[in-house]
Image (cartoon, rainbow, N blue to C red):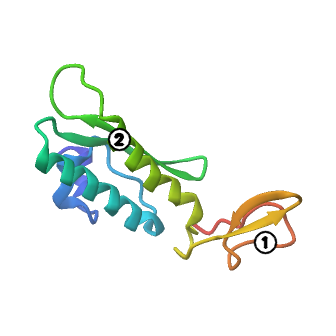
Amino acid sequence: MSRKEEYMSNTRWADKADLFYYPPCDVPAWYPLIDEMIELIEEWNDHEEQKMRFFQIKEKFGTLVAYIQPTGDGVIDAPRHLQDAINKIANEGHKICRVCGERKVETVVESRLQWRCLDHWDNESRWRVREC
């Protein structure tokens, strides 16, 4: 058993391992977003000849990022409208608290708009408290 198969067998997406090149990031607060992206890929694969999968779903600079790729041979790009739909879902990740999973509130701090979870922000510091 490969490391990927071993890891994927212990995740909530064990039955969908063929949709991932690398296992997705393990942030429970983002599970609903990842599930929504999986539904898009599954719907695409049900209706199109060229199948798609996730190359990576990861956290990058505190946001959710997803890359998709075709599963077949040859040089074929993923359709732009599918990439845009997945990116739209992934962009919601920065609006969800990684600790409690609740939606953050858009606030103004020192003349800057920021998304904050009011339950998990250290008011004495300009840095977020990270509990995970």
Q: Quadrant of residue 33?
A: bottom left
| Residue lying at 47% horizontally and 69% vertically, measured from the top left | 29
In this rendered view, identify the residue nearer to me: 53 or 124.
53
- Cα distance in 3D space between marks 2 and 1: 39 Å
| Residue lying at 20% horizontally and 48% vertically, measured from the top left | 44
Q: Specify which label sits upstream in the sequence, 2 or 1.
A: 2
Residue 57 locus on image (x, y percent): 40, 48
- Please tell me whether residue 47 is drawn above or below residue 120 in the rendered image: above
Within 10 Å of disc 1 (Cα), the crowding (few <14, some 14-19, many 20+) is few
Is 92 situated left or right of 85 in this image? right
Rendered image: mark on residue 81: 2
In this rendered view, identify the residue nearer to me: 63 or 130.
63
Rendered image: mark on residue 90: none
Tag 1 residue: 122
> Is residue 67 visible to the viewer in this orientation of the structure?
no
- Please tell me whether residue 53 is drawn above or below residue 125 in the rendered image: above
Asked whether disc 2 touches disc 1, contact meaning CB atoms under 8 Å apart, the reply is no
The amino acid type, in three-letter code, at marker 1 is: Asp
Secondary structure type for disc 1: loop
In this rendered view, identify the residue nearer to me: 79 or 104.
79
The amino acid type, in three-letter code, at marker 2 is: His
> Is residue 10 visible to the viewer in this orientation of the structure?
yes
In this rendered view, identify the residue nearer to me: 78 or 93.
78
Secondary structure type for disc 2: helix
| Residue lying at 62% horizontally and 69% vertically, measured from the top left | 131
Residue 75 locus on image (x, y percent): 24, 20
Q: Quadrant of residue 76?
A: top left
Within 10 Å of disc 2 (Cα), the crowding (few <14, some 14-19, many 20+) is few
